[in-house]
Image (cartoon, rainbow, N blue to C red):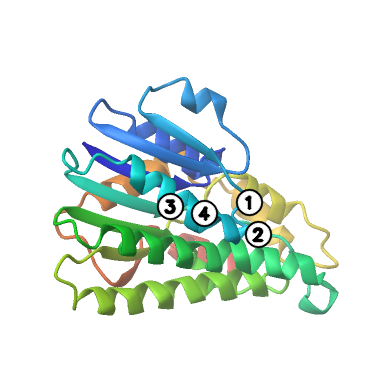
Amino acid sequence: MKYFIITGTSRGIGESIAEQLISPNHYLYCISRGKNADLVRKSKNIKYYEVDLNQFQQIESLMESIFNSIDFSKAVGIYLINNASIIAPVTFIDTAMISDITQNINVNLIAPILLTSLFIKNSNKYLIEKRILNISSASVKYHHPGMSLYSAAKAGLDVFSQCVGLEQNHSIAPVGVVSIWPGMIDTNLQREARNQDKSTFPSANLFQNVKDAGMLSTPEETAKQIIEFLFKTDFEHGTVVDIYDYSKVQQTYD
């Protein structure tokens, strides 16, 4: 049995990843603020946790519950996909509310750091395949006024993944860790970006242009690429991986 811990499964990429991983030989632990009832109905091998990752005090007990329910005598692999993410607040930093700033960093950076730490801690004695995918963003490279928090959090996630990769090179039972840029996808996050007030987010037109030009991938297409990468024989441990061709998007910037 392969076990998967996936955050942000209520919709978008996370939902598509979970749907495509459904198999008699897979068991899924799905995490989001609200329960995705449609997803749960598709498999008996799903346990759902309604957890707000902004409330990061709950994360330790969440991971303890998950690991206590795994039958390691049957486990051949265990995987963590840190997918949950928020883009808000999309505004200049001097107009952002303190509560919105902390929520962004909590969900986009602190929560995946804690989940990664607890995943490694709870699995370090098991000599099975163990991998973590941290879903990052090309916003680390392509910067927009009004998205300083999102870009900074994702940049932090990339560096964190690389450093943890170095640490795991010293482990007897190492966990493979990768930060991945999935591309521009037609999700609620993209819709939120292009529908912002242009006075506080001047790049709203860019996001609309990308949509109008048909450059957005579907969550299903992206999920397929991510899963293929997760199972790669030559898993690119300790790296930041771009699975999207951003050259076509760059033309929109020029």
Q: Earlier in the sequence, mark 1 or mark 3?
A: 3
Left or right? Give the position of 89 relative to 31: right
Image quarter of residue 236: bottom left
Element marked by disc 4: loop
- Marks 3/4: CA distance? 30 Å
| Residue at point 20%, 66% (across, down) | 174
The relative height of residue 223 versus residue 100 in the rendered view (above or below) is above
**Dot 1 or dot 2, earlier in sequence:** 2
Q: CA distance from mark 2 to mark 4?
A: 13 Å
Relative to 140, is 78 above or below? above
- Which label's residue is closer to the chain start, 3 or 4? 3
Residue behind mark 3: 63
- Between 27 and 121, which is closer to the camera in this rendering? 121
For label 2, the SS is: loop
Q: CA distance from mark 4 to mark 1?
A: 10 Å
Residue picked out by circle 2: 87
